[in-house]
Amino acid sequence: MPETTEYRIEYSIQRCDDESGDFVEIGFGSSGTWVDVDGASHAIGTDIEHRQWETRPGMPDPEEVDRG
């Protein structure tokens, strides 16, 4: 049986700070482990679409990001 390679994509979500003009991290996450890059990519897209990324203290709630 051939070995299966697994993939994971880690990401950071940043937005421009109005005061400084610098980009600051407002969230992050990982696709989890998948047997192909397409699966990992789909997992990230779903997490972002449903606002399910992780945050640290001081980061905005994902549900409040760019939705007015």
Image: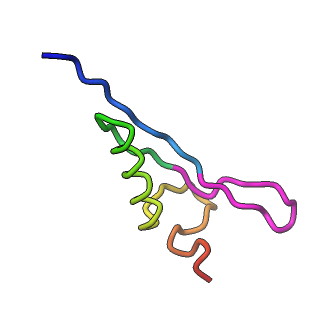
2 left or right, relative to 38: left
Q: Is residue 19 magenta?
A: yes
Q: Residue at x 43, y 52 (%)?
A: 44
Q: How is the image coloured?
A: rainbow
Q: Is most of the magenta stretch helix, strand or loop?
A: strand
Residue 2 quadrant? top left
Depicted 8 relative to depicted 66: above or below: above
Where residue 38 sits: x, y (%)? 37, 43
5 left or right, relative to 2: right
Q: Which residue reaches farthest left?
A: 1
Q: Residue at x 46, y 39 (%)?
A: 9
Residue 6 quadrant? top left
Q: Is residue 64 magenta?
A: no
Number of numbered discs overlaid on the protein picture: 0
Position of the C terminus, as image quadrant, is bottom right
Where residue 59 sits: x, y (%)? 61, 61
| In front of the other: 6 or 60 | 6
Q: Residue at x 39, y 60 (%)?
A: 46
14 left or right, relative to 33: right
53 left or right, relative to 33: right
Where residue 45 sits: x, y (%)? 44, 57
Where residue 19 sits: x, y (%)? 86, 66
Tell me where the magenta segment starts and ends, as one range. Answer: 13-28
| In front of the other: 62 or 46 | 46
Q: Which residue reaches farthest right?
A: 20
Position of the N terminus, as image quadrant, is top left
